[in-house]
Amino acid sequence: MGVQNPQTQRKNRRTTWLLGGMVVMMFGFGFALVPLYNLLCQVTGTQSIALRAEPGKAVAVTDEIDASRLVTVKFDTTVNPDLPWNFAPANPVLKVHPGQIYEVNFIADNRSSSPITGQAIPSLAPWQATAYFHKLECFCFNRQTLNGNQHADMPLRFMVSPDLPAEINSLTLSYNFMRLKLDQQPEREAPLPPIVAATK
């Protein structure tokens, strides 16, 4: 085998460095995926899986209702195209006092003649309010199955914390209902957290 000329050697070294750099970058990108995903969730107002599944986090129900303050809660719904359901809130907008528990119904209709199972994935905007919006009971905690042409009311019980920052006076809770195949595991929220009385 002949000796490579200097130009070919330089090209080979450059190619080796480029390939090595790409390997390092790909390795670093793998570590950065989770922080990047959480950042994307924060920017778009979507709750990440980590935020939706904080294990064992208790919701403090307080008897201190801030009657002097009203927060507008808007409800937004979308249905995946492969799920033949109608799904909408009975009341799309609700004005609430922080610290008070409210209940709102969502109405679902299966337009098909066959049983279908779906899962509602929630998100809250602005994302800074996530820690102050407590779902005490929600259809989104579990998969939902509707028989053919079935109509169902799906309740949500929630409370906005009195600690919600003063500059936030409007929230939007969005649900995206997706179809689950028979062998597909749903993306669950955390189990219903224990409710404890707030101590003064």
Image (cartoon, grey):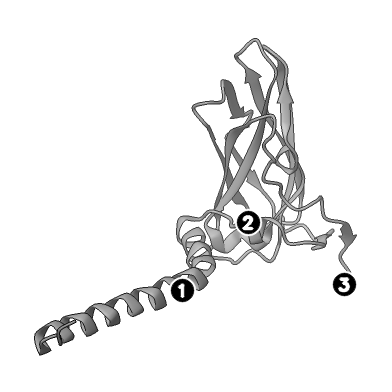
111 or 7, which is in the foreground? 7
- Mark 1 / mark 2, whichever is N-terminal: 1
Question: Which numbered disc covers residue 27?
Answer: 1
SS for tag 3? loop
* Spatial separation of the CA atoms under disc 3 and disc 1: 50 Å
Query: Residue at point 13% right, 82% down?
Result: 8
Label 3 amino acid?
A: Lys
> Is residue 36 depicted above or below 173 in this figure?
below
Residue with the mark numbered 3: 200
Q: Give the residue at mark 2.
A: 49
Separation of disc 3 and disc 2 at Cα?
Answer: 32 Å
In the depicted view, which residue is nearer to us: 53 or 169?
Answer: 53
Placement of the N terminus among the 4 image quadrants: bottom left
Asked if residue 100 is positioned above or below residue 80 in the image, the reply reads: below
Total labels drawn: 3
To which quarter of the image does residue 162 belong?
bottom right
Looking at the rendered image, the disc whose residue lies closer to the viewer, 3 or 2, is 2
Q: Does 173 appear above or below 127?
A: above
- Report the Cα–Cα distance between label 1 and label 2: 23 Å
Amino acid type at mark 1: Phe
Residue 20 x, y percent position in the rendering: 35, 79
Q: Which amino acid does label 2 sit on?
A: Ile
Which residue is depicted at the point 67% across and 13% down? 114
Q: Is mark 2 on a helix, strand or loop?
A: helix
Q: How crowded is mark 1: few (under 14 residues within 10 Å), some or many (20 or more)?
A: few
Residue 85 position within the rendered picture, expressed as x and y whole percent measured from the top left: 59, 22
- Specify few, some or many for label 2: CA neighbours under 10 Å numbering under 14, 14-19, or 20 or more: some
